[in-house]
Amino acid sequence: MSKSGSKPRDVFVFERVETLKANESKYIKPHRIHYKMNGKDLIWDCMKIHDSVAILVYNRSSKKLVFVRQLRPAIVFAQLCQSIDSIDLNVFSKENIHKVNQMFEKNPNFGYTLELCAGILDKQGKTPQEVAKEEIAEEIGYVVDLKDETPKGKGGGIDDESIEVIELGIEEVRQLLYCDDTTSAISRPTAMLFALSWFLYQHLPTIS
């Protein structure tokens, strides 16, 4: 796995889990749908989230695909949930949280995902294409629409983002796509795996 530059390891400590109020998050909004089917009253709980863009970046000069590696606390939360049988947050004991933090110390990829460059569409007046260009520049340091395919910045995200740029060759990408979740060194979002399948079997043959 090829890394662009050296990035010190994040210092992460999982502290607590709390329940959000209905309108407390600016990223997700819980809703309950009431409806009837065959005369019976039913409900369905769902989440309203921002639309987003994701970009599969391929550098034709180096013949490598460019990804981002970053911490996703939800992955840590999911690991914590595996040890309990209830979604009652009171069961997230200090002992369980301590065990999760120990896992983070032992495994440098625990809680991290390897992802496509991506971002949410929350910027007023900007098209998805414009947001995509900004995310590419911010996260991996590339400027699109140029013949020169070398990065123009260091990437790494903005504000509190802590992003590591990862470059993989074609064969490394094939291995990433086909390895089992239990043997993969790092979590891989399903959407990224679909994108890689498209790239390898639909797009790559047209540019090789």
Image (tube, grey):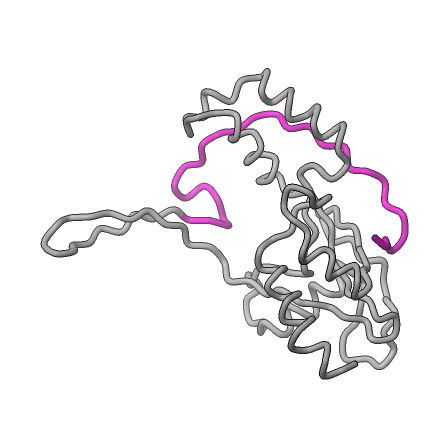
Which residue is depicted at the point 69% across and 27% down? 103
Which residue is depicted at the point 82% across and 59% down? 167
Q: Nearer the viewer, residue 145 or 36?
A: 36
Q: Nearer the viewer, residue 142 or 171?
A: 171
Q: Which of 173 and 72 is in front in this view?
A: 173
- The kind of secondary structure the magenta stretch mainly shows is loop
Q: Residue furthest left?
A: 39
Q: Which residue lies furthest to the top in this view?
A: 95
Magenta-span inclusion, residue 113: no
Query: Does residue 151 appear to the left or right of 162 in the view shown?
Result: right
Which residue is depicted at the point 64% across and 26% down? 100
Q: Position of residue 190 (x, y in %)?
A: 57, 56
Query: Does residue 145 appear to the left or right of 78 in the view shown?
Result: right
Which residue is depicted at the point 86% across and 67% down? 152
Q: Position of residue 134 (x, y in %)?
A: 70, 66
**Is residue 144 positioned above or below 14 on the image?**
below
How many numbered marks, from 0 up? Answer: 0
Q: Position of residue 78 (x, y in %)?
A: 55, 36
**Is residue 101 positioned above or below 189 on the image?**
above
Quarter occupied by the C terminus: bottom right
User: What's the magenta region?
Assistant: 1-29
Magenta-span inclusion, residue 20: yes
